[in-house]
Amino acid sequence: MSEPGGDAKVRRPSHPSPLAISIVTSVYSCRFLTTPQVARIISRDERTTQSILTRLASAGYLAAVWRPVAEPGVPDTVYALAQRGADLVASHLDVDRGRIRWKKYHNLVGLPFVEHRLAVNDVRIAFATNTASSGLAVEGWWYELPIKEDIYDPVEKGFPLSLRPDAYIRCLAGPRRLHLFLEVDLGTETHLRFAHKIIRYLAYKKSGWFRLRWGGRSFRVLTVATTATRTRALRRITQQYGGERMFWFATLEDITRRGIGEAVWQLAGDDGPRARLIEPPGPVGGPARL
């Protein structure tokens, strides 16, 4: 991945608009975003959004990072934080600049990492924009939360057990709190590696450490794949290893097109009608929040 640059001087606005600040902080939170993703976050059309992003990149708040794409219509530019954007985030959040963990080299990562983070961000945006109508409210989102507990790891045959989900999400559903781990599968890992994840999640739940650490009695593992064929394969593996009730499966297209709270989910051992994360209550309002 490469970050285009230039030495031309540009006019930089001294006081970014609230919309511009919202975009910059969203990019900071998500690390990489495309124009269509930002458009969904701010509820603008893509042409308007692209114009805003271009100005923010020219002003030094964002970095326009080129990525090679093979399919027509797929954005070949993703947006990441830039130096002035990091300063803006620190000022907006009223924190010391040193607490904004950003360096220019953070934008220069491999294409597989960028593609995977963009897919995870598609799920995050679906949570932020589609859950309110189904009675879900995102309480917190953490990327790649490292879990390392001093319990027996049945895969490594020793201590401690280690997990690194793509995200850990806490949602409120009325008086209930849902604890969700997210695994986004782009079809690049083997069936055996996925089976090892199942074994570790089952061991983590059985140990009781999840309840001690996070205060929840149980959790679900939301597994999002790019195709229905891949989803069926992962469901078969999960059924073989006993994760039927813990793992919920959906395709990325269904989530982004229909919504995270809709009937897009299937359990490993259930070939019946697709399910919702919760039964929907009456309509509620609320803005999207990343």
Image (spheres, rainbow, N blue to C red):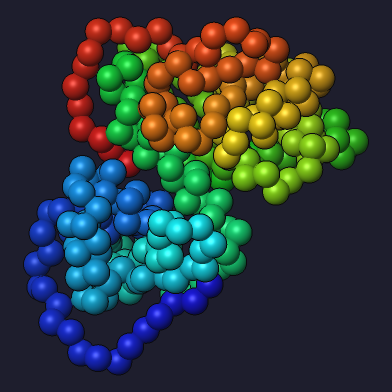
Query: Does the image show residue 56?
Result: no
Q: How many marks?
A: 0
The residue drawn where x is 32% and y is 28% is 130
Q: Position of residue 238 (x, y in %)?
A: 74, 23
Query: Does the image show residue 262?
Result: yes
Q: Position of residue 150 (x, y in %)?
A: 75, 35
Nearer to the camera, 111 or 290: 111
Residue 165 occupies quadrant? top right
Q: Is residue 223 left or right of residue 191?
A: left
Q: Is residue 32 above or below residue 141?
A: below
Q: Is residue 204 above or below residue 120?
A: above
Residue 259 occupies quadrant? top left
Nearer to the camera, 260 or 242: 260
Quarter of the C terminus within the rendering = top left
Q: Is residue 231 left or right of residue 13?
A: right
Q: Position of residue 285 (x, y in %)?
A: 19, 22
Nearer to the camera, 40 or 277: 40
Q: Position of residue 235 (x, y in %)?
A: 70, 23
Q: Is residue 49 left or right of residue 119?
A: left
